[in-house]
Amino acid sequence: MLSFAPNAVKKAVCGHGWATKAEVAKAVVARYPELKAYLIHDRKWKERFHANMFDAVALGMMVSA
């Protein structure tokens, strides 16, 4: 089992370890433009759900790089 610190993932994806969830989401969308539709939210729960989704995709980007 592998584990990565959140700051390590943020640094790999955004270039610095103190990136916000919004910055991570924008970096993921820059790589995968088809996810852009998930940046806009009309409900608070959707914002949290999609922020976690973008974090998971960022982790995958880090591992595959």
Image: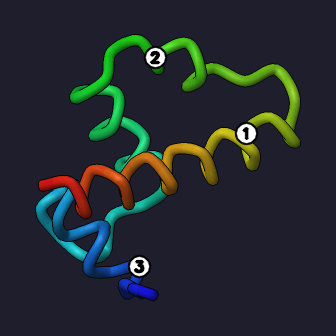
Name the secondary structure under disc 3. helix
Question: Could you say where residue 52 lies in the image, as x and y percent from the top left?
Answer: 63, 53
Q: Is residue 4 above or below residue 31?
A: below
Q: Is residue 3 above or below residue 36?
A: below
Would you name the residue on which mark 1 appears? 47
> Which of the marked residues, 2 or 3, is nearer the chain's N terminus?
3
Name the residue located 87 percent from the left edge and 29 percent from the top edge.
43
Q: Quadrant of residue 28?
A: top left
Name the residue located 36 percent from the left edge and 84 percent from the top edge.
4
Question: Could you say where residue 41 lies in the image, as x and y percent from the top left?
Answer: 72, 24
Q: CA distance from mark 2 to mark 1?
A: 13 Å
Label 1 is placed on what type of residue?
Glu
47 and 55: which one is in front?
A: 55
Name the residue located 27 percent from the left edge and 50 percent from the top edge.
61
Name the secondary structure under disc 1. helix
Can you tell which of label 3 and label 1 is closer to the viewer? 3
Mark 3 neighbour density, 10 Å: few (under 14) some (14–19) many (20 or more) = some
Residue 15 disc label: none
Residue extending furthest toward the front = 1
Mark 2 neighbour density, 10 Å: few (under 14) some (14–19) many (20 or more) = few
Question: Could you say where residue 12 lies in the image, as x and y percent from the top left?
Answer: 17, 65
Would you name the residue on which mark 2 appears? 36
Residue 25 as seen in the image, left or right of residue 8: right
> Which of the marked residues, 3 or 1, is nearer the chain's N terminus?
3
Name the residue located 73 percent from the left edge and 39 percent from the top edge.
47
Name the secondary structure under disc 2. helix
> Which of the marked residues, 2 or 1, is nearer the chain's N terminus?
2
Would you name the residue on which mark 3 appears? 6
Mark 1 neighbour density, 10 Å: few (under 14) some (14–19) many (20 or more) = some
Q: Quadrant of residue 11?
A: bottom left
Which quarter of the image is occupied by the C terminus? Answer: bottom left
Q: CA distance from mark 3 to mark 1?
A: 19 Å
